[in-house]
Image (cartoon, helix red, strand yellow):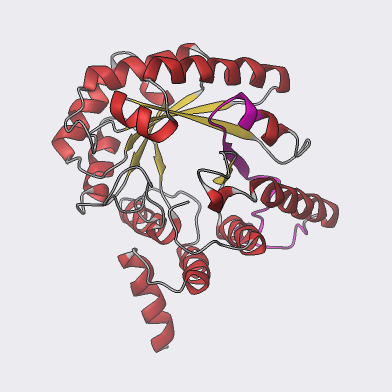
Amino acid sequence: QNEVKIVPTETKIKLVQKLVNAGCQYIETASFVSPRWVPAMADSKDVMIGLKAWRDAKAGEGTSHDEPVSMLHSPASAVFSVLTPNLKGFENAMSVGDGVVDEVAIFASASETFSKKNIDCTIQESLARFREVTEKAKDYNIPVRGYVSCVLGCPYEGNVDASSVAKVAKELVEMGCHEISLGDTIGVGTPDATKEMVNEVKMAIDVDMLAVHFHDTYGQALANIYAALGEGIQTVDSSVAGLGGCPYAAGASGNVATEDVVYMLNGMGIDCGIDIDKLADAGSYILGELGRESNSRCGRAILAKACSL
């Protein structure tokens, strides 16, 4: 949503296919927000219809048991999640039909000002909207993931109290979210601040229900992830090639690059099941379409090494 160039629908679908083939098992594939405010997401329904067709086709092909395990990644085993900011967005997502939207996500803020700028309502008003989504999701037996933004700082208010983060996260869990992703939307966090914030939230929510989501504006994302892992966090959000950002957080860079996270985890002996070379290839593909360089140091290094062979 933060790219100047509008990415064609087929390109989005192919990127998801490449990520699945690399071993990514959880992919946020679309956002059912108002196309008036976020025109880059206007084709979300078409993206999901295309992914459904691909998933159905692959299911029909079957998989040979003679193939190596690394080749068994399929759209059937991946979770395709979509953002749904309100009931209308949820209903639009469900209109795609059965068999492709595996999970929906809602996003609240720990900052009042950011909430008003980002989704045009107060925190409590946003939570009321999200309750409508979580209640409706029960009818479809669709799990809901919750995001809390600005957990380590706000572009308008500055520091954000960790107790505010914990309060919003707890309310999301109480309305039915199975997992809460704690987002450093503007990338100002540091390892010590991360530990403090995570420990505050852990007092309200079981750590197994928590994930972290770091933007890399000040180059602290990997260090913050390492600190969060030490506090028991086991789920980390990331973005291929470090793409992304937020139109309502001026200066914020994209989410931490998936390639960089996977490289670090591999070095720690943590196997997340992702083929890093195929992942770098997926990053190269979308960067070629966008006409820009990668924000991933690891991705750049892998591609440079491949070119030199």
Question: 9 above or below 52?
Answer: below
Q: Position of residue 40 (x, y in %)?
A: 54, 53
Question: 74 above or below 176?
Answer: below
Residue furthest out toward the front = 36
Count the labels in the image.
0
Query: Residue 188 versus residue 181: which sits nearer the camera?
Result: 188
Question: 81 above or below 295?
Answer: above
- The reply to whether residue 24 is in sight is no
Q: Quadrant of residue 142?
A: top right
Question: 47 above or below 172?
Answer: below
Q: Position of residue 183 (x, y in %)?
A: 34, 36
For the record, the magenta segment spans: 64-90
Q: Within the magenta stretch, is there residue 82?
A: yes
Q: Residue at x 45, y 63 (%)?
A: 276
Q: Horizontally, is 55 left or right of 204 in the view?
A: right
Q: Position of residue 166 (x, y in %)?
A: 30, 18
Query: Residue 4 versus residue 151: which sits nearer the camera?
Result: 4
Q: Horizontally, is 132 left or right of 1 in the view?
A: right
Q: Horizontally, is 154 left or right of 131 in the view?
A: left
- The reply to whether residue 181 is in sight is yes
Q: Within the magenta stretch, is there residue 42?
A: no
Residue furthest out toward the bottom = 309
Q: Residue at x 56, y 55 (%)?
A: 23
Residue furthest out toward the right = 60
Q: Position of residue 56 (x, y in %)?
A: 80, 50
Q: Horizontally, is 256 left or right of 44 in the view?
A: left
Query: Residue 301 versus residue 156: which sits nearer the camera?
Result: 156
Quadrant, the C terminus: bottom left
